[in-house]
Amino acid sequence: MDFHNLSLKEQLQGLKKGSFSSTELTSHYLERIEKYDDELNSFISITAERALIQAQNSDERYANNQAYGLDGIPLAHKDIFCTKDVLTTCGSKMLHNFVSPYSSTVYEKLDAQGMVMLGKTNMDEFAMGSSNETSYFGPVKNPWNKEYVPGGSSGGSAACVAANLTPVATATDTGGSIRQPASLCGLTGIKPTYGRVSRYGMIAFASSLDQGGVLAKSAEDAALILEAMSGYDPKDSTSLNVKHIDFQTNLNESIKNLNIGLPKEFFDAELPPYLQKSIQESVDVYKHLGANIVEISLPNINLSLPIYYIIAPAECSANLSRYDGVRYGYRCKNPKDIDDLFMRTREEGFGSEVKRRILIGTYALSAGYYDAYYLKAQKCRQLVANDFTEAFKKVDVILSPTTPGTAFKSGEKTSDPVEMYLQDIFTIPANLAGLPALSIPCGEHEGLPLGLQLVGNSLQESTLLQFAQAFQSNTDWHKKLPNI
Amino acid sequence: MALSDKELKEIAYLARINVKENSLKKLKKELGDILNLFEELNLADTNSVEAMSHPLDLSQPTRKDLVTEKDMREELQKNAPSVQSGLFLVPKVIEGED
């Protein structure tokens, strides 16, 4: 049976009815991973044995009428989420041998729902990258066309969901790392409001921007998993202590008379004609559904990229100082003194993009430059956040492309870091302001998918998912999957 | 803007990352390109703007001063490159004791 053509809800119903077992479902995905992942390289670790034990336990719970909410559904975790007794590498040589002594809250929450972990997915090293080419474990290929990148940093999670090697995968987003690969692989990817999903046990890159989320094949699937991942966690001091919201109930409500803002600054940018056309067609879908289209202005939005490339590296340089070859991870051979131990461990253990960002961050935070760079960036960040506050007085969601175009060829942008950074020009602003945002498939060009981004006001994930669901109830783009 | 060799070496030492002489030139160019991106911020008027250090306007939560973590020394040290008698081993830091 082609289990992978079923939605999560259908898979759950099948398990509940006893039409098939979690062992059958899990085996199906493990077989597909075995068959297709050598080429895609979307997994760093495949935990087949453990998955089959989890599946068997799930089957027993169903037999005893003790099943949990998402019992028996397989998933893959981005290798940034610590999982006890399993390798957690963050895509880095620095952590190539790291076995976490505890699990992340995200893992615990989904495990407590009975979900079965198939493995840990490949990613850009320490989540720094937009093409999944910076991983120590090799690049990931885009299942739509293997000469192209899947996007990053959650490229492994995106590739394996798009290739139906797992029904769903966790991911993280610091500047677009869920939405950009969702766009490039034709998936639905949501980054919730900062603080919605606990960061405990999620390896830190830029702590004021990092947020966990989901890559799935539809808004409905994404809503189901996001709801299970979310919630207050006393172990994360930035976790939001807000009422738990049910992302399901309002999913199918009409978006009639709701307001969609189109920021003129995004549409003034030079977009390729095929992208303009797809976005215009998507806007027409929403118009047809009764939404109002409003032109808005985010006057400081063009500052987002430079702000991000000061703040993210500054925070990363502090967060990554913990990798020193003393307590865990990689250590250089034959250090002659303590400085040599630190300096060669970090030279050899980190890849070039990670080192560039640590150096930029160190510079931006160093005496004499702090005010000119870091403080200035934080002030500008406030300006961008204020722009959103103003905009959300008038509109319910803000619509734009997710990326400046379709996926690009492997190796095309690796020689020019700044060129690569431009991939995230539309996604970064939501991270700066801590707002929820998602990407849904909205078209294709030359056989590669295109994504539409919706940004919502703080804690309005339900509204975003409602808009995504309305779109997907009236279009088929999300149903198209690559022929692998 | 461009960094001098001396500046780059200083930053690399602050970050404790060894940089080989033959990679200085390429790295200076790459970092210079990134620093050029930042110039755009100088155009923004931020005189009356407060710095935003975090997306959430929250006060730091506090907890009761109680021990909540169990002793995991052995488990934690399983990941260490070098351990002796429950201590992390590093090259000698205090000189003159041979």
Image: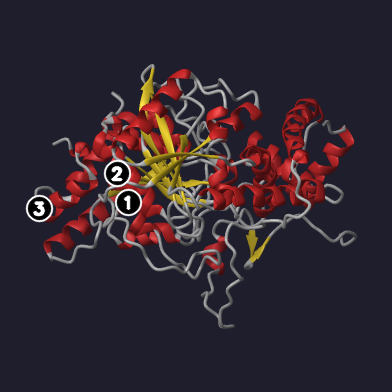
User: Measured from the top left, where is residue A273 in percent x and y?
Assistant: 47, 18
User: Is residue A4 at all visible to an observer of this figure?
Assistant: yes
Callout 2 crowding tier (Cα within 10 Å): few <14, some 14–19, many ≥20 = many
Q: Return the residue nearer the eye: A467 or A484.
A: A467
**Is A12 above or below relative to A398?**
below
Crowding near pointer 1: few (<14 within 10 Å), some, many (20+)? many
Tell me the amino acid under the disc marked 1.
Ala
Q: Residues within 10 Å of mark 3 (few under 14, many from 20)?
A: few
Q: Would residue A332 appear left or right of A245 to someone viewing this image?
A: right
- Please check whether the numbered discs 3 and 2 fall on a single chain: yes
Answer yes or no: do the residues labelled 2 and 1 have beta carbons within 8 Å? yes
Q: Earlier in the sequence, mark 3 or mark 1?
A: 3
Marks 3 and 2, how far apart in space? Answer: 28 Å
Residue to which mark 2 is pinned: A469
The label on residue A272 is none
In the image, residue A427 lies at what x, y percent? 52, 39
**Image label count:** 3
Element carrying mark 2: helix
Residue that label 1 marks: A223
Q: Residue placed at 25% from the left, 56% from the top?
A: A70
Whichever of labels 3 and 2 marks the residue nearer the N terminus, that label is 3
Q: Residue at x 57, y 43 (%)?
A: A429
Of the numbered discs in the image, which one, if any, rests on residue A18?
Answer: 3
- Amino acid type at circle 2 is Gln
Front one among B33 and A116: B33
* Mark with earlier residue (2, 1): 1
Tell me: residue A358, above or below residue A111. above
Measure the C-alpha gap from mark 2 to mark 1: 10 Å
